[in-house]
Amino acid sequence: MKLEKIKIKFKKMKMHNIENALEEIDYENIKPNKIQKRKKPYEDKTNYKTIKEAFVNSLKKYSKNPCILEKQNHKEPYKTITYKEFGEDVFALGTALIKELNLENKRVLIIGETQYDWYVSYMAILCGVGIAVPVDKDLPLNELENVARRSKASAIIYSPKKEGDVNKLKELMPEIEYFIEMKSEKELDGKAVGIKTLINKGKELIANGDNDFEKIEIDPEEFKILFFTSGTSAESKGVMLCNKNLAENINAVSAYVKIYPTDRLFSVLPLHHCYESTIGFLVPIANGASVAICEGLKHIVPNMQEAKPTGMLTVPLLVETLYKRINEKIVKSKKDKIINVMISATNTLKSMGIDVKKKVFKEIFDNLGGNIRIIVSAAAPIDGKVGNWLGDIGITFLQGYGLTETAPISALTPEYDLCIGSVGKPIVQADIKIDNPNENGEGEILIKSPTLMLGYYEDEAKTKEAIDEDGYFHSGDIGYIDENNNIFITGRSKNVIVTQNGKNIYPEEIENLLSNVEEIKDVMVYGKNPDGEQAKKKDAKELIVTAKVVPNFEKIKELHGEVSDEEIYNIIWEQIKEVNKKLTSYKAVKQLEIKKDDFEKTSTMKIKRYKEIEKK
């Protein structure tokens, strides 16, 4: 799903009787909660060594519980697959991949949109088949071929929507042994076979006494997953992970956040990304919770209302869009002022142990399914007012920090010790420090953690460059750690603009300010080499702080009427000058570039800076 094309629609919010909401609550039957200021992680955190260990534990404890919810088509209700059914399919597929297709210890590429068969495939490979290679479904054919070659894939499990590219790969890469189509019951014909056929064959083998796959023991430290980074600042690298890396993510989350068997996560983000496949899939599965699959962003509201999730992983663009759309409806209802009064009143009650936010703001909750309690944002900075507002209406807002190289979590907000603006505290297993901090305590974030990758695939030089002799991963992110051990990200070292007198300018800081300008849809700040007349000046070696802006044409028309390209430039430049007043002089934007089409981005909506800078 293309996150840059988010068009979320909520029905009209009437906010009926919000003024009297507090008066209608039966306080006599509300038992005040004892307010506890917890500072320590939960003592009962898990200690899994492998994903198979966690999965088998859930199969035993939660066999009858809902596991995956998927829509077969938009008109039908969600179909619920239990843990028992999911487990049977996983073990059957694993058995068939090894016994029928001889894929044990081989590399299997998975490509496709989020669907049940993706989950079955990934879990089967993690539980003993070979090495899983999750791939971005939006890769063009040439990049897909490149990944398949680099990973030395022996088989490809693919969505029917990728059939065209896969048919071309059959010709380009005759060395690939099998092409397995999701949702398909095709019998084995040469190299082609349907995944349902394999699952049925696996079930036959198991019914006849073959339980070899179940007996496979997983080496926690062995290379078993190959993720390719999204490449926002350089070409993508292959990240080698092991079962231990992923299992330690489960353990890390359990120390900071309680996930219950009654919880349901709403899957919106692409599964080939480590963030969604680990935290959005493996974490709930390890806790007996369920996962509901979103059909697509245009269906996000009706899907949430039907699935009634309790949690959701997002990226800032998505949660900020939800925030804007809900508040637009509130403003149209002309109840925005009373909502603010109710927020203040319910915050006061909550401080006394009486939490009635879900009842007072029921209409907002109902639009999100009625049960939402946690929203997690990661992958990029987010405006603090969004997180504060979510907390004000009764939703716990958490942030996470990590990279594909840390599988992905290295820091997370504890639900019992919130700090909006921070990306969280180091996970309990991690040692995170700031390298060479400046006078403000800022420096590169270094990470040592059991979630840290084995290394870059077939690239020892880059591995040694990224992980020092003491075992610390050099993240490339700039930040500081406060007295309460909260981590704050202020920039990325690879994006840093260095002035001639040694000052560092982190584009993210300026971009965050510019993103609040209504006339700006998207922005990238970078240091531009002087050219033309500028190159002749005395300070010609100084990089020019430049803002490349995608205008919000709809908003400009709404606010300023029909205007020319020149007028659009002037409107945005005037807004940039206002933002410059909030910056020290050397950080001020000196040049504006207007871009009419969208930025090239990764699947988690990070601008591919190196690609955009290369464009003239």
Image (cartoon, grey):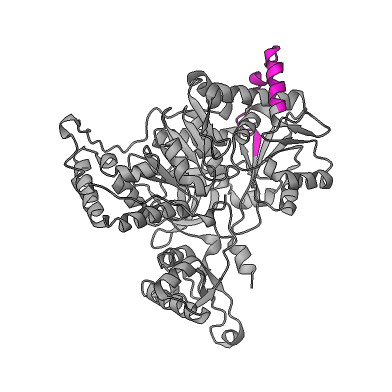
Q: Is residue 292 above or below residue 609?
A: above
Q: Nearer the viewer, residue 222 or 360?
A: 360
Q: Nearer the viewer, residue 210 or 194?
A: 194
Indicate the quadrant where residue 584 lies.
Answer: bottom left
Q: Nearer the viewer, residue 35 or 71?
A: 71
User: Residue 254: where, in percent of width, then height?
Assistant: 43, 33
Indicate the quadrant where residue 439 lies.
Answer: bottom left
612 part of magenta stretch: no
User: Residue 562: where, in percent of width, then height?
Assistant: 46, 77
Q: Quadrant of the C terminus?
A: bottom right
Residue at the extreme top of the image, as rendered:
209
In the image, the segment drawn in magenta is 197-225
213 part of magenta stretch: yes
Left or right: 66 as drawn, with respect to 335: right
User: Residue 68: where, in percent of width, then height?
Assistant: 53, 31
Left or right: 307 as drawn, with respect to 601: left
Q: Is residue 437 above or below residue 57?
A: below
For the image, the number of numbered tags is 0
Q: Is residue 98 visible?
A: yes
Q: Residue at x 65, y 35 (%)?
A: 224
Q: Residue at x 35, y 55 (%)?
A: 329
Q: Is residue 428 visible?
A: no
Q: Nearer the viewer, residue 25 or 495?
A: 25
Left or right: 485 as drawn, with respect to 74: left
User: Residue 615: where, in percent of width, then height?
Assistant: 64, 69
Q: Is residue 156 above or below residue 83?
A: below
